[in-house]
Amino acid sequence: MNEKYEEAKKILKKYKQEQLLIWYDKLIEEQKEELINQIFNIDFEEMEKLYNQTKTTKSFANCKIDPLPYIDKEKLNKEDIQNYEKQGIDVIKSGKYAVVTMAGGQGTRLGHNGPKGTFELEVGEKKPLFTLLAATIQEARQKYNALIPWYIMTSRENNQQTESFFIRHNYFGLGKENVKFFVQNELPMLDTNGKILIDEQGMVKEAADGHGGIFEAMRKEGILQDMKERGIEWIFIAGVDNVLAKMVDPLLTGIAIQNKCLAAGKSVVKAGPKEKVGVFCKKNDKPSVIEYTEITEEMAEKIDEKGELLYGESHILCNLFNRKALEEIAKNKLPYHSAFKKAKYIDKSGVIVVPTEPNAYKFESFIFDAFEKLNDMAILRVKREEEFAPVKNAEGVDSPETASKLYINYMKNRNK
Ligand code: UTP
């Protein structure tokens, strides 16, 4: 152990991160070992690059941006829908379809104590988000008489609580063997001087590496392999917090297949030029999403010949991928974006600091950065009130209150 300690010390000296060992002597043996392992696993060169990157702004200025064509579900006639759906249903019925839920986020805006999926939404009675998602899968299983495996991405922080929750709920009757968890990667958080923070336990302060971490995690954790062995070809990936996500969707699947695309995404109409959402676009002729922080005012307000926003297809984190596309994307890392966040840490004098203002950089990759690796992507515009009810904030927009209203209304109307 001593040798490893000396080695870690040397590495830290080289990268001027010696603070990471100041509480080492106070740790118990197990923690000491974990801390040394954490240090060995950090790519310090990359952390330096990421810190330098916080001083620059990412710009779309030198890219060629165009609208990405989409299909409007409302404008499809019955026959078209049936045609598309037939192909999708074949995929689902033959056991080639799986669902992935990304549940590794911290849910800081919601402020719920525990994994976001365990948050109880009032929908006539209080039901956890995971319960609502499980019901969607259960219903599809019955409708298509198919086994639809469910993969759930968690973080180191919430994995145990998430798994225990599923055990307590007996995997919602879906069968333990059909629900698989996998943990995403983490990256250290940096203070404003580029120093890695220490958490309350004296360990390296790390945070999940964003929903874009899904591709690497699926490869590393053997999920892609598991899918291959099960003969899965199409994979729907969505967040844990959209209670109306139509996770088993033959229409989207059929559209992807008929358009010969290895991926498809759903959009809803952007509420207005200023709504804080990313929109689908083409960037240098490849599918992409331009974020609200990156789009110019002029582009955001541009109107097309139908009088609609030219860049008005909001990305709602509901995407479908062919397994081959996932395997290809997972070969390389996606770029990281930095966010300035509030992060609790322990300072040099041993005081636990609970900041009231952002104090640290967190690095995340975004799932939509992977779209550029694809030649094309089919986009399906769906109705917000039918497929998008996110639980993001404790109050106001995209809150439990709005999501529960949308969910209740949808359930009422669809049974009419
Ligand atoms: P958000 O970006 O809305 O983040 O994630 P969040 O963690 O839920 O909430 P805030 O921003 O801290 O308030 C969208 C979806 O992506 C997942 C989340 O769990 C959510 O389902 N996600 C996000 C991950 O799985 N891992 C991550 O590292 C980040």
Image (spheres, rainbow, N blue to C red):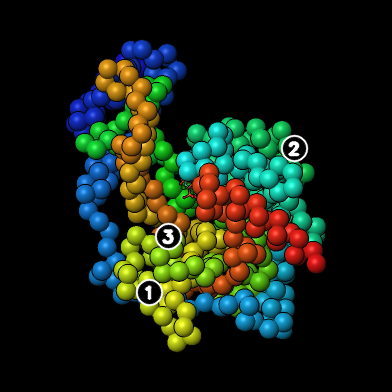
Q: Is residue 235 left or right of residue 47?
A: right
Residue 301: which disc?
1
Q: Give the amino acid type for the residue marked by disc 2 in the picture.
A: Asn
| Rendered position, 199 above or below 387 | above
Q: Nearer the viewer, residue 207 or 334?
A: 207
Mark closest to the chain's N terminus, 2 or 3: 2
In the image, the residue with mark 3 has its CB under 8 Å from the nearest atom of ligand 1 = no
Q: Nearer the viewer, residue 248 or 330?
A: 248
The image quarter containing residue 37 is top left
Instruction: State whether residue 72 appears in this view.
Output: yes
Mark closest to the chain's N terminus, 1 or 3: 3
* SS class, disc 3: loop
Instruction: State whether residue 188 appears in this view.
Output: no
| Rendered position, 346 above or below 140 | above
Q: Label 2 vs label 3: CA separation?
A: 38 Å
Q: Nearer the viewer, residue 9 or 226?
A: 9
Q: Which residue is mark 3?
A: 276
Disc 2 packing (10 Å; few <14; some 14–19; many ≥20): few
Q: Residue visible at 71% across and 55% down?
A: 408
Q: Residue visible at 21% across and 36% down?
A: 193
Disc 1 packing (10 Å; few <14; some 14–19; many ≥20): some
Q: Label 1 vs label 3: CA separation?
A: 13 Å
Q: Is residue 140 left or right of residue 388?
A: right
Q: Which residue is mark 2?
A: 170
Mark closest to the chain's N terminus, 2 or 1: 2
